[in-house]
Amino acid sequence: MSTNPDAFPTDEVAGPVLRFAGVGMRYGRSPEVLKDVTFDLAPGSFHFLTGASGAGKSSLLKLIYMAEQASRGRIELFGRDIEAVAAADRPFLRRRIGVVFQEFRLLEHLSAFDNCALPLRIAGGKPDQYRGDVAELLNWVGLRSRMHALPATLSGGEKQRLAIARAVVGRPDILLADEPTGNVDQGHALRILRLFVELNRLGTTVLIATHDEDLVARSGKPVLHLDNGRLRHYGRGAGQ
Amino acid sequence: MFDVQRWRPGPLLPRRDARDGALVFVVSVLCFLACLTAIGALAANRAAQGWTSQLSDSATVVIQPHGAESPDTAAARAAEALAGVKGVTEARALEKEKAEALLEPWLGREALLDDLPVPRLVAVELDPKAPAKAGDLDRALKAAGVQATVDDHSVWIADIRHAAGVARWFALSVCLLIIAAAAAVIGFATRAGLAAHRDVIEVLHLSGAETGFVARLFQSRFATAAGLAGLFGAGSAAAIAALARLAGGGQGLSPVLPLAWIDLLALLPAPLMAALTAAVAARLSAAAILREMG
């Protein structure tokens, strides 16, 4: 069992960053919410995950960031079967995944700056080392003047952008976002999309769960569509 | 102007709230009870030791005068003979009045008629380090030609030792039970406190925090709270014990339950034990919650 942060070097992946092979998932004894899901994500790719409410989008993302376990099938992350990864090594694997939660999950007692810096702090970073990067990132997402504000005082859009900033501050290899434009107007949604595209250009693999068909169409990016827990097709948005 | 305070990283756990106050209160009360019981157990132990040593350090000789010799003369001769025995520090013939005073509670003043043959007694104080045996006293009396019965309190001592042992074990058992209950409640309260911060744990966990990182946060938080509570509880118990000791005068709280100042030292580890229990409970609980999260 390895507990070394170097157990998951970032340049190791030659094949897909993420591979689902015949994955099924259920909560407790309830019927499966995901059925025989199979797909690959290549390094540096950008995909949307679409489907109606309850189709299994959030459950699929939870399997990737290891908040839930598959009831069958195999999931490989960075070339490793995640079921075979020792519990002590999972934190290091999670640090390579950035997650924008649907409900943000900001820590209400921390300032916007401290929320954004959280992954760096957890990874052992010192304030002197990350202060400049975090401030620059918050500036980039338009929260420069709100750095020391508590989440309770931020608007829905500001919280959304803060959650995105926290997800990307650690320069993750893969970025997962669950309905990242669900709480913002069309203008903000496009700004957020541009932010994701910029990150993707820097090499981050992006997977965005959304039911915003308009956003998907404008992006022209490939789509994974879930229908009642089954992956129906790979496709492209209308824009491309 | 650059404000250092604004840029100092905030604490990863929310500041103390009402739930922490409840934890401190419960742990304080339990520590207080545990400390009081501990002091009671120490006092009961000391009382039990006192009872047995008082009885084992003395013997009573009942004189049976014969011939023309008066009971007082026989008792005086017996005391003289016994005083020379090795292991006896003092032998004293009790006057008739003292013997009557001893009988009065059972017979009443009216019954103590002048012609009632009240036995004469000799009180013998024994050397606590090397007390004389009943046989030594018997031989000395026979050598002096005094007919007497030696009562070395062995029957009493056996009963008192038994009662003292029961009292000691009872006090110790109650004390251990309360300490165990206190530890269990500290554990439960810590778990409840931790569960209340489950949302924070989840965010830290999903952001890549290791078990040790999360456990350390809660460990220090709850250990500090429980240690503080232990200090309040032990301090209050010590204050009450000190008041009881002062009010009790030279014999401690009472001759039945003698308290000593040194007993208060037994309360010193209480805050440390409370802190340690909370730290262990927090660590185990945090690890369990993280295990559940996968």
Image: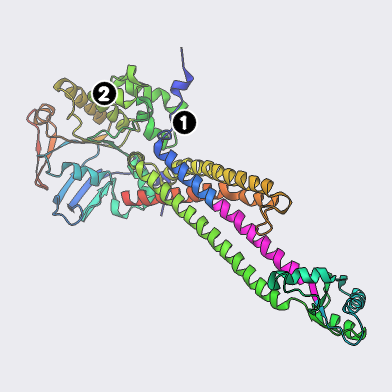
Picture quarter containing residue B55? Answer: bottom right
Q: Is residue A237 left or right of residue B182?
A: left
Q: Verify whether residue B133 appears in magenta.
A: no
Q: x%, y% of residue A150?
A: 34, 25
What chain is tagged by disc 1? A
Q: Main secondary structure of the magenta part?
A: helix
* Residue nearest the viewer, comparing B195 with B247: B247
Vertical position of residue B288 compared to residue B123: above or below? above
Q: Is residue B173 left or right of residue B250?
A: left
Q: Verify whether residue B56 appears in magenta.
A: yes
Q: x%, y% of residue A216?
A: 12, 31
Q: Is residue B224 visible?
A: yes
Q: Which residue is mark 2?
A: A158
Q: Which residue is mark 1?
A: A126
Q: Residue at x 51, y 60 (%)?
A: B177
Q: x%, y% of residue A166?
A: 32, 31
Marks 2/1: CA distance? 26 Å
What chain is tagged by disc 2? A
Vertical position of residue A5 compared to residue A149: above or below? below
The residues colored magenta run B34-60
Q: Residue at x 28, y 19 (%)?
A: A142
Classify mark 1: helix, strand or loop.
Answer: loop
Q: Is residue B205 visible?
A: no
